[in-house]
Image (cartoon, rainbow, N blue to C red):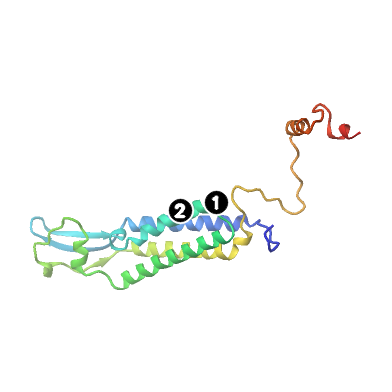
Amino acid sequence: MTAGGAVRDDRRGLGIVVLGLLLGAAALWGSGTAPWFTVDVPTATRGTVAASATGAQLQPSVTAVAALLVAAVAALIALSGIARRLLGVLVVLGAGAAVALTVRLVAVPPTPAELASARAGLNTGGAPEGIGAVEATPWPWLAVAGGVIALIAAVLLVIREPRLPKLGSRYAAPGAKAPETDPDRAAWERLDAGGDPTVGPRESDN
């Protein structure tokens, strides 16, 4: 039990938190590696080409938060109590920032010239007026969805932490049967105490 008397038996809640963080990380990473905006750009040597920029190129925080979420899942094994809650707050801040920055970028897309410059080695031939209109793809919304999922999981972690079990530790429900003693281990313990390991506990008491 915790100091407040709560039993750390909410394994389903812990599973939801872990699953939410992993899904959020996968969505953010997948979105970050996909093209977010495309534009037709006239070049000096290849004519008009379709240039695109990925989420990681335009908003590096997306993949950075994805890495944070994976690290947070690993940290759940070692942390508990206030440390776990601080971890949840950190994830809330990171996921919230990723969502806010992505929505802002979708609301105010990069200019054609900015998007063209995001593609390394692309020569526009000094004619930015010939660049077409910027077109958005659906991939930024995957980042928004992943950030929201991670945000919900982190809030659940902060709120439910006193009931979430510590990974790697054993928790017995009230009234559960105590584990049986290993006979070999009990014999060695009696030998260390100066008793006869061939005699059972009840016989040695007589």
Q: Picture quarter containing residue 9?
A: bottom right
Residue at (74%, 35%) from the top-left corner?
182
Q: Residue at x 22, y 64 (%)?
A: 115
Residue 194: image x %, image y %? 80, 31
Query: Which sits earlier in the primary sequence, circle 1 or circle 2?
Result: 2
Q: Amino acid at mark 2?
A: Ala
Within-10-Å neighbours for mark 1: few <14, some 14–19, many 20+: few
Report the disc number at residue 71. Answer: 2
Residue at numbered disc 1: 78
Q: Residue furthest front?
A: 194
Given residues 179 and 138, the one toward you in this image is 179
The residue located at (47%, 63%) in the rendering is 90
Badge 1 amino acid: Ala
Q: Nearer the viewer, mark 1 or mark 2?
A: 1
For mark 1, give the secondary structure: helix
User: Along the horizontal axis of the image, is 133 left or right of 152?
Assistant: left
Residue shown at the point (75%, 32%) measured from the top left? 192
Quadrant of res 84: bottom right
Is residue 46 shown left or right of residue 183? left
Crowd tier of the residue under label 2, counting other residues whose Cα lies within 10 Å: few below 14, some 14–19, many 20 or above: some
Residue 180 placement: quadrant: top right
Q: Check disc 2 and report its element: helix, strand or loop.
A: helix
Q: Position of residue 140 (x, y in %)?
A: 34, 64
Kindly report the distance in space between the C-alpha atoms of the residues bearing marks 1 and 2: 11 Å
